[in-house]
Image (spheres, grey):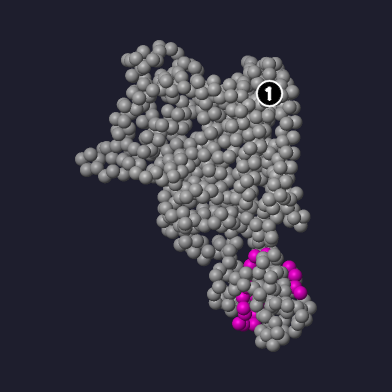
């Protein structure tokens, strides 16, 4: 069979997204564990935190509960992976995977009980850290950790996909569905358990050697790890780099996150340098580029923008930088420049690796994989500052120096290569594409419903979708025909932060609302085609719309014979060549202003806060009101279809002017879903010419 790299990429990306489902829990519970440890530290809180006090006992209970996701990590992966991997009946797939995993461990326990020495395993030892053994659901078994859980869960999902819908004869009805899957898993786990008993002890020895190699690689190892973790973000494969380090056994048993939290009290009380206490923490410095690099990038983009557009660019960048620095979510900022100037992303990854390596060289180590909130404040700076303040002062100084380096390098490259980062294009429209999708739809239509519908349409409709999953911020979709997938700008105009298009493997950068968007996306796949869904929505009062403001022929804005309007420099909109004398209100609102002396233009503020300018004719200001009769005054409330201005079309033409009437939304950048209809005949107050 021929090798198809697109198919491989689809499978790998889907698996990476599924693997992130359980990982989402680690950040939240890591903060709770860290906060509990912080509140039990007498060096910070004094005698109230001494062992045996009511305060200490309370936080001890909280801490033990918060350790759940770390202590039960294999079970979490076994149950969590099918949520992302299974293409149907996910809940049943989770149950099946759990049962098959338990069966596997019982088989391993039985085999090692009988033939442990033959496999090179001393099964009489206690199942403690470093023994190669573990307790899983009260079963003493091999410590296969996250890797074993992933393997078994993947096999369970495979069996689920093949067997769940098999139609057996009625007399075998007992074995249909989940029963058939689990029975098949029972049979399969016999050879799988034997292979694990045979191979895993050697694999554990290999992991020990890998841990030694990586920790002994020193500065270069930290640089390479951090560089790969950043550079692979556009592909979505960065999960495969950091998860084995942070949550797996790549450099320390149990992963850096759990190990750090387990020993943080010990590290806080020791006066030895952190680099001696925990050198493995160098592989958790990838968050430093989020805290110190992103502000430098944003400043460079801001100061290279055109002066008149910096205010708008700042409105885009400030929330993105705050999100990156505080929460460690960098994609809204990184994808702002990634699709315009990929070379900047390469430089960003190189600088991220260099920053981490430099800090490690000067003795900085710890658990800095995220932003300030979940790493620095709770897990490093506050609990350890008393005895390790010199390390953290060094860290901050190096970080701020690199902020300046990021700024200088990015500013130089943007100017030197004339890169069209936000605020540097020929017109204002590119800035619209990179704002946060912060516009809220009407009260009765959820914005996440709108995004799901828009994304599905841009992906070619439900018939083009093979499967869908998600990670922390991305909707990961496999499509049948990637030529049907719209351009990146279409997705960003609909509220996405960007798009990764690798053949039929598509990633829509949604943000932290991606689980809810995916849920709605999958609901659309089960219902009518998205095009039908959109029609139903747009034909109800729940969907904000703009009606024709004159009777006549609708004209696209780019075909208006006036460059100021056609270029959208004043806003986005549409025009009508009128055939009847009345200009009407396109929606409910109030009159903001009127050119009373000429009557050729007026402004409306709609009830949805959209600001509308209606301009009657080209250069008709020169007619000084002749042929124009204004029917409203500033401050008047108007309803859709209300008459605003009466015009004499023939008089305008005889004077040598074009009566084409233009309607533009001057604050269009606040409405990411704003779109206008194609050219057609329209009736004032009746025909929909735009939706948002």
Horizontal and vertical percent position of residue 82: 42, 38
Residue toward you, 624 or 407: 407
> Which residue range is magenta in the image?
571-595
Quadrant housing residue 461? bottom left
Q: Residue at x 31, y 27 (%)?
A: 191
Relative side of 61 to 186, left or right: right
Residue 326, percent from left and from top: 67, 38
Frontmost residue, 491 versus 689? 491
Residue at figure coordinates x 49%, y 56% from the top left: 485
Q: Is residue 166 above or below residue 621?
A: above
In the rendered image, residue 216, in percent from the top left (x then y), is placed at 58, 21
Query: Tag 1, which secondary structure?
Result: loop
Determine which quarter of the picture holds residue 1: top left
Would residue 587 be visible to someone looking at this image? no
Residue at image position (42%, 53%) is 480
From the viewer's perspective, is 190 left or right of 46?
left
Q: Do we see residue 119 in this rendering?
A: yes
| Residue topped by disc 1 | 363
Residue 573 covered by magenta stretch: yes
Vertical arrangement, residue 304 with respect to residue 77, above or below? below
Residue 175 position within the rendered picture, expressed as x and y whole percent measured from the top left: 27, 37
User: In this rendering, is residue 658 above or below 603?
Assistant: below
């Amino acid at each position: 069979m021929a090798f198809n790299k697109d198919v491989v990429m689809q499978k790998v990306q889907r698996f990476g997204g599924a693997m992130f489902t359980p990982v989402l829990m680690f950040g939240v519970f890591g903060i709770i564990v860290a906060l509990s440890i912080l509140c039990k530290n007498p060096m910070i809180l004094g005698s109230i935190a001494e062992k045996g006090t009511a305060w200490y006992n309370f936080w001890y209970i909280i801490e033990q509960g918060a350790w759940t996701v770390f202590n039960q990590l294999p079970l979490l992966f076994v149950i969590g992976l099918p949520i992302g991997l299974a293409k149907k009946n996910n809940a049943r797939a989770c149950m099946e995977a759990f049962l098959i995993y338990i069966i596997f461990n019982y088989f391993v326990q039985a085999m090692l009980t009988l033939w442990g020495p033959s496999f090179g395993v001393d099964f009489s030892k206690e199942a403690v850290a470093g023994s190669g053994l573990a307790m899983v659901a009260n079963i003493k078994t091999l410590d296969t950790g996250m890797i074993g859980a992933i393997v078994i869960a993947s096999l369970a999902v495979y069996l689920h996909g093949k067997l769940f819908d098999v139609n057996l004869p009625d007399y075998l009805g007992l074995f249909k569905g989940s029963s058939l899957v689990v029975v098949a898993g029972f049979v399969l786990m016999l050879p799988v358990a034997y292979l694990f008993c045979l191979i895993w002890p050697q694999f554990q020895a290999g992991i020990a050697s890998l841990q030694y190699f990586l920790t002994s690689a020193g500065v270069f190892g930290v640089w390479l790890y951090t560089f790969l973790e950043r550079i692979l973000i556009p592909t979505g494969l960065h999960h495969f780099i950091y998860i084995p380090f942070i949550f797996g056994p790549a450099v320390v048993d149990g992963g850096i996150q759990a190990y750090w939290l387990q020993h943080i009290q010990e590290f806080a009380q020791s006066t030895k340098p952190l680099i001696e206490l925990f050198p493995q923490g160098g592989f958790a410095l990838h968050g430093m580029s989020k805290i110190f690099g992103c502000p430098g990038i944003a400043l460079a983009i801001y100061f290279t923008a055109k002066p008149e557009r910096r205010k708008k660019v700042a409105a885009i960048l400030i929330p993105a930088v705050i999100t990156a620095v505080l929460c460690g979510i960098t994609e809204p900022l990184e994808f702002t420049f990634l699709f315009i100037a990929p070379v900047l992303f390469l430089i960003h990854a190189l600088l991220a690796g260099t920053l981490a390596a430099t800090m490690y060289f000067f003795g900085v180590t710890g658990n800095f994989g995220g932003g300030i909130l979940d790493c620095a404040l709770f897990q490093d700076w506050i609990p350890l500052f008393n005895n390790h303040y010199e390390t953290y002062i060094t860290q901050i100084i190096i970080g701020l120096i690199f902020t300046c380096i990021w700024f200088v390098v990015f500013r130089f490259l943007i100017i030197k290569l004339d890169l069209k980062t936000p605020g540097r294009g020929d017109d204002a429209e590119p800035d619209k594409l990179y704002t946060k999708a912060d516009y809220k739809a009407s009260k009765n239509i959820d914005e996440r419903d709108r995004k799901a519908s828009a994304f599905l349409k841009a992906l070619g409709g439900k018939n083009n979708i093979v499967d869908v999953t998600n990670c922390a911020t991305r909707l990961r979709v496999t499509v049948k025909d990637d030529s049907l997938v719209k351009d990146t700008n279409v997705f960003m105009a609909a509220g996405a932060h960007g798009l990764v298009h690798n053949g039929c493997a598509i990633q829509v950068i949604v943000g932290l609302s991606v689980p809810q968007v995916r849920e709605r996306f999958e609901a659309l796949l089960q219902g009518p085609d998205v095009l039908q869904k959109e029609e139903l929505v747009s034909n109800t009062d729940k969907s904000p719309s703009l009606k024709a403001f004159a009777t006549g022929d609708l004209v696209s804005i780019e075909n208006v014979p006036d460059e100021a309007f056609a270029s959208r420099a004043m806003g986005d909109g549409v025009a009508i060549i009128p055939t009847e004398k009345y200009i009407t209100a396109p929606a409910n609102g109030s009159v903001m202003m009127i050119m009373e002396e000429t009557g050729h233009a007026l402004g409306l503020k709609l009830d949805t806060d959209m600001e509308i300018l209606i301009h009657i004719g080209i250069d008709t200001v020169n007619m000084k009101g002749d042929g124009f009769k204004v029917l409203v005054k500033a401050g008047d409330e108007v309803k859709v279809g209300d008459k605003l201005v009466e015009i004499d079309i023939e008089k305008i033409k005889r004077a040598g002017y074009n009566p084409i009437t233009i309607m533009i939304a001057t604050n269009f950048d606040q409405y990411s879903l704003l779109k206008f209809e194609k050219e057609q005949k329209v009736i004032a107050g009746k025909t929909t010419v735009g939706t948002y």
